[in-house]
Amino acid sequence: NDNNRRNDILDVVDAELLLYKREQHLPLKKADGSFNNPLDWWRLKQQQYPLLAGIALKVLAIPATSAPSERVFSVAGITIAKERSRLDPANAGELIFLHDVMPAIKRYEASIH
C-alpha cells in the first residue's frame, strides 16, 4: 500500500536526520591548515545516511561561483557581436562550444602521445 510505503520512507528520513544531528561537526580546516571537503565526508557517510548523502552530494556539487557561466556569456558576447549579426544561431552555439572544448581536446591528445 502506498500509504505504508510513504510512512516507511518518512521513518527512514527521520532516523537519518536524528543520527546526523548527533554527528560531530566537520571542522572547517584540517590540522595542516588545508580546508576539509564536505563532499569527501558525505562520500564516507553514504552507507550510513543514503538519503541525506544523495541530497548533500547533489547540492554540494553546485559551483559556489558564477565564474563558469560568466565566462560562457563573455565568449558568447564576443562570438555573437554586432559585426556578426548574420551568424546562424546554430553556428554561434557550435563556436561557443568549440571555444571551451578545443583546449581540453588538445590536452587529451597531448597526454596520449
Image (spheres, rainbow, N blue to C red):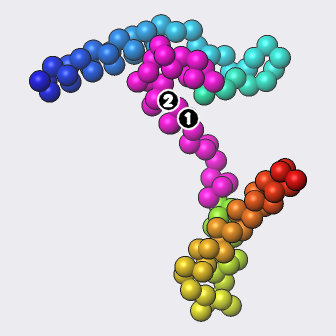
Q: Which mark is residue 52?
A: none
Residue at the image point whose x is 63% and y is 24% from the top: 40
Q: Position of residue 94 (x, y in %)?
A: 62, 74
Disc 1 + disc 2, Cβ < 8 Å:
yes
Per the image, is 64 magenta?
A: yes
Residue at the image point whose x is 11% and y is 24% from the top: 1
Residue ID for mark 1: 60
Q: Where is residue 15 in the image (x, y as percent from the top left)?
A: 35, 11
Residue ID for mark 2: 56
Instruction: Name the one closer to the observer, 34 or 39.
Output: 39
Tell me which corner region of the image, top left, top right, bottom left or bottom right, holds residue 41. top right
Left or right, 6 with reference to 100: left
Q: Position of residue 46 (x, y in %)?
A: 51, 20
Residue at the image point whose x is 65% and y is 71% from the top: 96
Per the image, is 65 magenta?
A: yes
Within 10 Å of disc 1 (Cα), the crowding (few <14, some 14-19, many 20+) is few
In this picture, is 14 found above or below 77? above
In magenta, the rendered stretch is: 40-69
Q: What secondary structure is found at the residue carrying circle 2?
A: helix
Q: What residue type is labelled 1?
A: Leu
Looking at this view, name the residue that lies furthest to the front: 113
Q: What residue type is labelled 2?
A: Ala
Left or right, 75 with reference to 31: left
In this picture, is 34 found above or below 72? above
Residue 107 visible in the picture: no
